[in-house]
């Protein structure tokens, strides 16, 4: 008699929560790989490798919620200050992640983008990134942006240099024009920035774009970040009141003018929504 032994089926993840608002764009500062490795008695690079095991699940979970843009901060302009061996390891991890995941991304409607200084990377890695971007360019379920060799200050300086070198007149420089000179020209500003490993810093991530992002910090180290933490972060976001420096309509304590317009108060404050921010 032959007894077929089947591996136990992995329970499917719980369905996404029903939320009153879901961010269009989530940025993640993936932190704590080193501490995760230390806690497990492993070298730091093992922590970074472990930090790639959750990527598919994390990306799929956000996509299931209808998050259209996900940006992962994988290597900052300051990370060049780490030991050479760790830098080399991080480069080869990115290369392996692209090799391992690109077909899956493509099949599942994920468009890949990169932000940061590509020119400073190894030419083979540059080409690999460009090929992955090209392959997935028509996908529209989610845009996954990898911030690799990215720094918010460097991005802003680069924009300023290009504006100056193109001879743009100072009167023409406003926030809308400036956005066109940033790496993120084709993607909206983040609504939510999540940082793992309990830190409360932006660490040079999307400095311009994150001006009005909600911030969630979770104590969990990046390799342990998974579906439960995503649900928690999105639930916290859904309960935030976003005012963009203005007031919510329910908070305005003076009668609306008869013409139905959003009248200015004597002190000049207005009730603002996302689309009528005054510049
Ligand atoms: C920060 O942890 C993490 C990094 C600098 C690497 C980022 C993430 C990965 C390698 C995962 C792979 C993801 C992609 C998209 C390729 P840390 O080393 O600063 O941790 P520590 O603060 O505990 O030392």
Image (cartoon, rainbow, N blue to C red):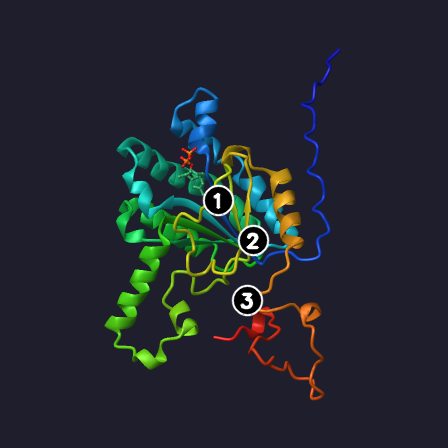
Mark 1 and mark 3: Cα distance apart in space: 21 Å
- Drawn side of residue 7 relative to residue 58, left or right: right
SS under mark 3: loop
**Outermost residue toward the bottom?**
259
Q: Quickly name the residue at label 1.
A: 200
Residue at the spot 71% in from the left edge and 47% down from the top edge: 17
**CB atoms of marks 1 and 3 within 8 Å:** no
Q: Quickly name the residue at label 2.
A: 109
Estimate the x, y position of residue 106 in percent, counting from the top left: 52, 50
Residue at the spot 39% in from the left edge and 28% down from the top edge: 44
- Drawn side of residue 18 relative to residue 132, left or right: right
- 17, above or below 32, in the image: below
Question: In front here: 19 or 184?
Answer: 19
Mark 1 vs 3, N-terminal side:
1
- Drawn side of residue 1 relative to residue 95, left or right: right
Instruction: Tell me which image quadrant ligand 1 sits in.
Output: top left
**Outermost residue toward the front?**
266
Some atom of ligand 1 lies within 8 Å of the CB belonging to the residue at label 1: no
Mark 2 and mark 1: Cα distance apart in space: 32 Å
Estimate the x, y position of residue 202 in percent, counting from the top left: 44, 49
- 114, above or below 186, in the image: above
**Outermost residue toward the right?**
1
Residue at the spot 37% in from the left edge and 44% down from the top edge: 75
Mark 2 vs 1, N-terminal side:
2
Q: Which mark is residue 245?
A: 3
SS under mark 2: loop
């Amino acid at each position: 008699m032959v007894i077929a032994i089947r591996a136990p089926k992995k329970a499917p993840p719980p369905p996404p929560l029903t939320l009153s608002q879901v961010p269009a764009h989530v940025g993640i500062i993936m932190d704590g790989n080193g501490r995760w490795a230390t806690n497990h008695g492993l070298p730091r690079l093992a922590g970074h490798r472990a930090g790639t095991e959750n990527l598919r699940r994390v990306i799929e979970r956000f996509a299931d919620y209808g998050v259209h843009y996900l940006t992962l901060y994988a290597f900052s302009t300051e990370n060049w200050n780490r030991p050479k061996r760790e830098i080399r390891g991080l480069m080869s991890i990115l290369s392996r992640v692209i090799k391992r995941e690109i077909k899956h991304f493509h099949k599942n409607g994920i468009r890949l983008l990169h932000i940061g200084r590509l020119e400073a990377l190894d030419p083979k890695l540059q080409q690999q990134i460009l090929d992955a971007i090209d392959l997935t360019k028509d996908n529209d379920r989610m845009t996954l942006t990898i911030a690799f060799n990215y720094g918010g200050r460097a991005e802003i300086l680069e924009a300023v240099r290009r504006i100056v070198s193109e001879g743009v007149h100072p009167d023409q420089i406003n926030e809308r024009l400036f956005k066109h000179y940033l790496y993120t020209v084709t993607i909206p500003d983040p609504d939510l920035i999540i940082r793992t490993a309990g830190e409360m810093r932006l660490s040079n991530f999307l400095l311009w774009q994150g001006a009005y992002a909600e911030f969630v910090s979770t104590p969990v180290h990046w390799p342990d970040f998974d579906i439960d933490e995503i649900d928690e972060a999105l639930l916290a976001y859904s309960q935030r009141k976003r005012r963009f420096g203005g007031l919510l309509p329910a908070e305005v304590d003076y009668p609306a003018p008869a013409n139905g317009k959003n009248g200015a108060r004597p002190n000049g404050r207005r009730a603002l929504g996302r689309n009528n921010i005054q510049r």
